[in-house]
Every structure is written in C-alpha cells, then in structure tokens.
Amino acid sequence: MSLAVAIQMDPIESINVEADSTFVLALEAQARGHLLYHYGPHDLALRQGRLRARARRLKVVRASAGRHFELGEPESIDLATVDVVLMRQDPPFDLAYITATHLLEQIHPATLVINDPASVRNAPEKLFVTHFLELMPPTLITRDRIEIENFRAEHKDIIVKPLFGNGGAGVFRLKPDDENLGALLEMFGSLNREPLMIQRYIPEVRAGDKRIILIDGEPAGAVLRVPAAGEARANLHVGGTAVKTTLTLREREICATIGPALRARGLVFVGIDVIGDYLTEINVTSPTGLQEISRFDGTNLAALIWQAIEAKRIAQGTAIRA
C-alpha cells in the first residue's frame, strides 16, 4: 500500500531530530513507500467547499539539524485527493488551532485525518481527562478565586496551571505557606479569560511523571520523566530526565478504562500522563515520546502507528466498495 500523506505541522526546519515524534512518523512513512507533503496550518484555504493546502513534497533523512529534510517547490494540493493527513502542529490550543480542526473536518473521513479533527477539538487534554474522575487526583477547573481558595484550604499543597497550556509552561506548585496565589491569579487573569486547572499536588511526581503511548486505544510503550532537583515539572524540555520504565498494574487498568473511549473517537495516537496512581492528562493534539521510548526498549512505535493507519485505510476502502 502506497499512500499520499500530507503532514500539517510546524516548520520542519526548527524541529529537534533526536526527539521529534512527527519526524520519526515521517521517516517511517517514507520507508513504507508513502509520498509525503509538508504544510503549516496557515497554508490551508477553504474555497467553495474544497480544502486546499499550499504544500511541498517532503523527503526526510536521519541527519544533523539543517540536513534532515528536503522540500520541493510549493504547490496547491486538494486535500480531498490525498489519503492521509497527519495533524501534528504543536499547541497552544487556541482559536487558530480550533479553526484548523473545523477546516480538516471538511475532508475527513474520506481523507483520513489523524487524529480525528472533531475529536481533537472536543477533547482538550485537560478537559477530556475529567470524563474519568475515578482515575484523577482531586481537581478544580474555574476562574473563581473563592473556589480556588477553598480548594487550597482543603488540599494545602496544590498545582495551578493554564487550562490550554502545553509543555509544562505556566505550571506552578503552591505549598501551604506560599503567599503568591493572589499575584498568580492576577497574572493569569491579565493574560486571558480562560479558567485554570487546579489539582492536589501529587508527591509521587518526584519519582517521575510517566508518559504512556496508546495506539488505537492500546498501550504500546512508556517512558518515565523524572523532574530535576527543585523543579515541580517533569517535562523533558525543562530539564526532566527520561528513564526506562514498564507499566504497572494500575497503569494498565487506566489504559483499559480509557482505551474504548479513544477508539470510539478516532484518536489513534494518544499520549497520557500518569503520576503515582493518577491520570493527569490525555494528550491528543500532538503527542510526543516516540523516540525516547524506542531508545529504551527498541520498539518502533512509529511503525505500529502506521500499521494502525493503514489498517483503517484498508477498512475504509472495503466499506466504500461494499
């Protein structure tokens, strides 16, 4: 099976080839004989019901930064004529991101968009997870200062973070004696009108925040991200260290609980975050972690993702012929 694949992502010039998950997805697709195009969300244009992208033919190679890709001349392609679109641009999950999901809905599922754009829009990482309260730590979503103060009075040690943030940006830990809550709420209030997510601090984060990759609802691999000394965040780009790991019984229970909901929503490539016994986020926009996991256990997760995508295209073709 040879597919035409359009990858909607951030500028490929700036990616870290040693860590970027979209890069290894492109490498694997190329190795499987698929034709690749690259474009950014700003290159989309909807006219008279036809969604086009000003895209370039893409070739990738495992090489040093700046030598890892080749791009052809720009051409306007009708996205209804390609087989697969990978929606892989990074958040923030703002109105531009939401608009991109609406545009891609125009072609899905005839053109298979991964992940399903409507489900991406309706399952923001920090909101979708609240459908599984039995798996989460105590959590509050609000802008109401009195509610936040009451939550803090009950749980003492808390985490405050933007509802639509990513990569650990804007995440704060407030210990019981910290006097900065008021100033912190004022700062967030000056930046946007969105609610905040407040959670009870989970001390097990010192042992690591586990990223688990699920492919079509099934766990496929994991990496433990251990925060640096004096840091409450375990994200690798803020100093966290990747450590080899395996799944615990509790983590398998978490995956079994959420897996059917992911499959039902067309969320093929998902990364969840687990601290201790708690599910904290379900990442559906642009999950990462493929390269780190592969280095530790040798599993080619990109190949498993493409197997799932190709199987869906085969099933789709069978349904159309029927």
Image (cartoon, grey):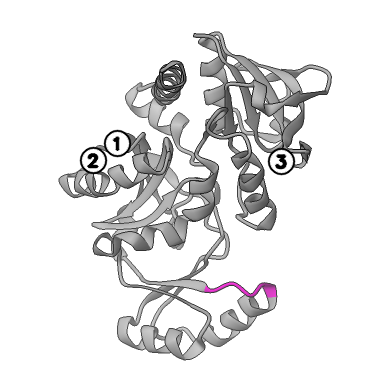
- Residue at the (28%, 38%) spot, across then down: 245
- Residue 210: x %, y % from top left: 34, 47
Residue 168 visible in the current orientation = yes
Please state, as top left, top right, bottom left or bottom right, where the C terminus lies in the image: top left
**SS class of the residue under badge 2?**
loop
From the viewer's perspective, tell me whether residue 212 is left or right of residue 25.
left
Q: Magenta span covers which residues? A: 191-195
- Residue at the (77%, 37%) spot, across then down: 43
Q: Check disc 1 and report the residue beneath it.
A: 219
Instruction: Tell me whether circle 3 and circle 1 mark residues in contact (CB < 8 Å).
Output: no
Q: Check disc 2 and report the residue beneath it.
A: 247
**Quadrant in which residue 147 is drawn:** bottom left
**SS class of the residue under badge 3?**
helix
The residue mark sitting in front, 3 or 1, is 3
**Quadrant in which residue 148 is drawn:** bottom left
Of label 1 and label 2, which has the lower sequence position? 1
Work out how far the residue at label 2 is from the one at label 3, CA to CA, in angstroms.
Answer: 35 Å
Query: Which circle marks residue 41 in the picture?
Result: 3
Categorize mark 2 by other alpha carbons within 10 Å: few (<14), some (14-19), many (20+): some
Against 72, is 123 above or below? below
Against 231, is 286 above or below? above
- Residue at the (63%, 47%) spot, across then down: 102
Work out how far the residue at label 1 is from the one at label 2, CA to CA, in angstroms.
Answer: 9 Å
Towards the viewer: 159 or 38: 38
Instruction: Tell me whether circle 1 and circle 2 mark residues in contact (CB < 8 Å).
Output: yes
Categorize mark 1 by other alpha carbons within 10 Å: few (<14), some (14-19), many (20+): many
Residue at the far left in the pictured view: 249
Residue type indicated by callout 2? Leu
**Quadrant in which residue 41 is drawn:** top right
Residue type indicated by callout 3? Pro
Towards the viewer: 195 or 202: 195
